[in-house]
Amino acid sequence: MLPSDSPLLGVWSDGYLTAREGTKRRWTAKTLEKKGRAVRRLLEHATDGQIDRDRFVALPDWLARRLEGQGG
């Protein structure tokens, strides 16, 4: 799901955040909660080249749980 090359994580993160902007109604502050806001900051930092690979490993599980909570 995530690129194995660290520099590509910034590009991937930028694309993910762009997609998020297009579906903002599903990403309200109420639905994001604390963990979601932390993930958003992680992605924003990655677009600036500040990549924390140790924290990125939790992202796929978070995304899967988020999709399950939205009914797919």
Image (cartoon, grey):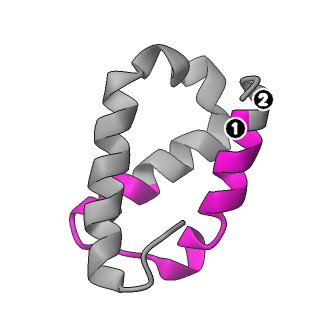
Q: Nearer the viewer, residue 70 or 41?
A: 70
Residue under the image location 25 percent in, 64 percent down: 11
Q: Residues within 10 Å of mark 2 (few under 14, many from 20)?
A: few
Q: Amino acid at mark 1?
A: Arg
Q: Quadrant of residue 18?
A: top left
Residue 9 % position (x, y): 35, 71
Residue under the image location 60 percent in, 31 percent down: 32
User: Which stretch appears magenta?
Assistant: 42-67
Relative horizontal placement of residue 1, taking residue 8 as reference (left or right): right
Q: Quadrant of residue 5?
A: bottom left
Secondary element at tag 1: helix
Taking the view exactly as shown, the residue that stands out farthest to the top is 25
Q: Main secondary structure of the magenta part?
A: helix
Q: Amino acid at mark 2?
A: Gly
Q: Which mark is residue 66?
A: 1
Q: Quadrant of the C terminus?
A: top right
Mark 2 highlights which residue?
Answer: 69
Q: Height in image: 31 above or below 6?
A: above
Q: Height in image: 2 above or below 16?
A: below
What is the distance, in whole Å, between disc 1 and disc 2 at their CAs?
A: 5 Å
Residue 59 on the magenta span: yes
Residue 67 % position (x, y): 69, 36
